[in-house]
Image: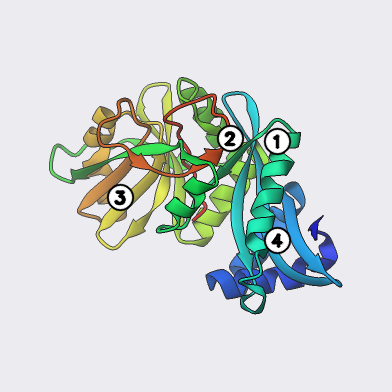
Amino acid sequence: MVVKGEKWMIQDLSRIWEVCFGDSQEYIRLFMERRFFTCEPLVWLEDRQVMGVVYLLPCLIEGRKAYYGYAGGVLPQFRKRGIFENLLNYAEWFCEQRNATFIFVPISGSEEYYRKRGFQASFFFSRKKFLKEGTYMSFQLHEADAESYTKIRDRKFSAYPYLRWDEAAVDYALAENRFCGGFAKIVTAHEDDDNIIFGRKNGNVLEILETTLDPETAKKLTPFFCATWNTDEVIFQFPIISDEDKIPNGGSFGHLNFQNGWMGLSLA
């Protein structure tokens, strides 16, 4: 049966996470301490045995309540019993009862399975790669806290159907990314025009997973970013403006009141 996760289950839930995703105890503890009590953990329980879980993280899309399905998994010895499918069914019902959109990012290769369940791709991004060539110019760059990041993000993305998180959720997302070696910065390219960059360094490549910079300004800033992080190129992800070259990045179940949504703030 499906029950809401409780504190006494955290040790067993941490074991499920470790077995299913291979993450470190420190990483799992970060989620359990910072996010467990602010989300809806849907747990499959039999005789006080925790067997599987899906975490629903509350958010908004186009002003409507939504839940982001996160880190779902079942212990190997209890698989092939339909537990995960039952958890998904319950999550869909849970969201329907609250007139909320159920948002989900399928594991690569599983998209067809979810499409048969009514899943629709609804979040996309465009990817642009810029080399460090060009005129180097210095800009103001400083650490982003959750309050400033949230304010800039909400203001700059208001023209898009974007996944909106409250400040506490953003605080966790920034902490999670930094734990994984990433960064969240505020960059001032023009006077009184602050923008955010959220990403991580991968060898000689700087990966910007979310930014409020427009592509033209991002290209101008690339030599500065490459010098700052000692990389040769920067790969940016932007909200899409047209249907050309759009890359799927998650979707939702049921009726949609938006198209070409922007997700950002990767929790992968």
- Disc 2 to disc 3, C-alpha distance: 44 Å
User: Judging from the image, what secondary structure is the residue with disc 2 in?
Assistant: loop
User: Judging from the image, what secondary structure is the residue with disc 4 in?
Assistant: helix
Camera-near label (2 vs 3) is 2
Contact? badges 1 and 2 (CB < 8 Å): yes
Camera-near label (1 vs 4) is 1
- Disc 3 to disc 1, C-alpha distance: 47 Å
Q: Is residue 181 above or below residue 125?
A: below
Q: Judge whether residue 24 can be spotted in this image.
A: no
For disc 3, the neighbor class at 10 Å (few under 14, some 14 to 19, many from 20) is few
Q: Judge whether residue 121 can be spotted in this image.
A: yes
5 horizontally vs 111: left or right: right
The percent position of residue 141, horizontal first and vertical second, equals 40, 40
Sequence-wise first label, 1 or 2: 1
The percent position of residue 69, horizontal first and vertical second, equals 61, 49
**Residue type, mark 1 in image:** Glu
Residue at label 4?
Answer: 32
Q: Which residue is drawn at the image coordinates 51% and 29% (left, top)?
A: 152
Residue at label 2?
Answer: 254
**Residue type, mark 2 in image:** Gly
User: Judging from the image, what secondary structure is the residue with disc 1 in?
Assistant: helix
Sequence-wise first label, 4 or 3: 4
112 horizontally vs 201: left or right: right
Residue at label 3?
Answer: 228
- Disc 1 to disc 2, C-alpha distance: 9 Å
Residue at label 1?
Answer: 96
